[in-house]
Amino acid sequence: MLLNSDEVKFSLEKLTNCSFFDARKILNCKKKILQEREKVFLLPKDRMLFFEKSDYYIQKILLPSDIKADDDIFLTENVVAEFCNGISEIGEGDWWIYAAYHVRKLRIIAGIGKGIILSRFLSEDFGISDEIEKSVMYLQRFGMTERVKIFSYPFIGNISSKIIVENSYIENFDDAEKIISEFLLNNSKIKPVISHKNYIEKILNEKVLCAIAFSAALLLFRIDKSFENCKNSVLSLEKNVRAENDTISLEINDKNFSATKRFIDAIKTLQNPLQLFHKTSEICGRHRLQIEQLLFEKQIKIKTSLSRSKSEKLKTCDDIVIEKFSSDEYEELGSNKKVGSIICIK
């Protein structure tokens, strides 16, 4: 079922300079105080990096109270975002506006990445160019400063704005609602806002940690199988080969092939590798450790540089063992210079 209702309310919250795990914690806290008709989730990123800090967005949706359906329920706004992405790729930081007539009503939908900020229904009496221009001004309140992608008809006029406008015209768009509905039927990647799947599938969808662990297991299996397939191309072409999904990203070449293969073999033996990496991320953040190299030999080891005062402080931590210093360890009396060290995470 495709829900096209003006009673659906959207809001988008920006999380600045967060790690993936920080963003997940904030999301889980918000889920604990949700009302019955509210949904929240993290917007997908172009590339997922667990330990690097970045900006994340949390989408919040308030659904109508009278929703009753036996089938999965999809929101028109989410389908439109994917539809526009198929016309001109929308990255996680790209602002966009969709404007088209749906059964004599003008639909204005706008957002950033796959997130929705604005969704409006207007009568056909409203000028489409004027409403797009108003929407451009509205998005600037949320941080849009440079450019916006407009998805609409070829006949719209020029938009008067300091923001750079990139027009992506939609041809043969007389029945926009029908085209959007057909697009949903032919696109299995779009997720429903309410799912009526069996119990096991529902658990995998709602329990985020289970979903991450499941996708991580599948990823490890696929990467393991893909090693042999990409090995010849790596050695012969001497180019990087990328193996990735939404959970992890690896770049493999002739220099790191053996080490990466050993890493995958080792991590497959762990019951919950994400928990170990999560713990490592928290320790590095707490003690401000700069990771020069990450090693894995039955446990995670971090190659870094420590001052004498920092190393003495770390020796008192229960979760950390300083395994080795460089050979010239603190030769000068009273020196606080940084020395190469390897830290083991228990």
Image (cartoon, rainbow, N blue to C red):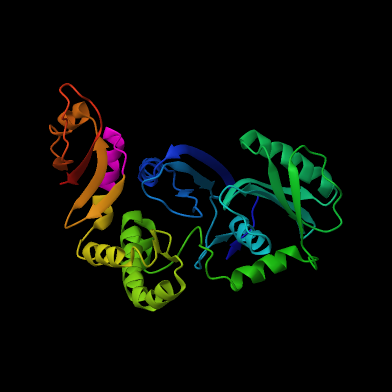
Q: Is residue 147 left or right of residue 333?
A: right
Q: Main secondary structure of the magenta part?
A: helix
Residues drawn in magenta: 278-291
- Please report the residue visible at 53 percent of the width from the left and 47 percent of the height from the top: 61
**Image location (x, y in percent) of residue 135:** 73, 42
Residue 287 magenta: yes
**Image location (x, y in percent) of residue 226:** 37, 74
Front position in the image: 71 or 204: 204
Regarding residue 99, the answer to whether it shows in the image is no
Residue 121 magenta: no
Q: Is residue 165 above or below residue 246?
A: above
Q: Is residue 111 above or below residue 268?
A: above
**Image location (x, y in percent) of residue 296:** 22, 56
Task: Tell me which corner region of the image, top left, top right, bottom left or bottom right, holds residue 255.
Answer: bottom left
Q: Is residue 187 left or right of residue 162?
A: left
**Image location (x, y in percent) of residue 276:** 23, 51
- Please report the residue visible at 20 percent of the width from the left and 61 percent of the height from the top: 270
- Please report the residue visible at 70 percent of the width from the left and 44 percent of the height from the top: 147
Front position in the image: 289 or 138: 289
Q: In the rendered image, which quarter contains the N terminus?
A: bottom right
Regarding residue 227, the answer to whether it shows in the image is yes
Task: Tell me which corner region of the image, top left, top right, bottom left or bottom right, holds residue 18.
Answer: top left
Front position in the image: 195 or 183: 183
Front position in the image: 238 or 151: 238
Q: Is residue 50 left or right of residue 280?
A: right
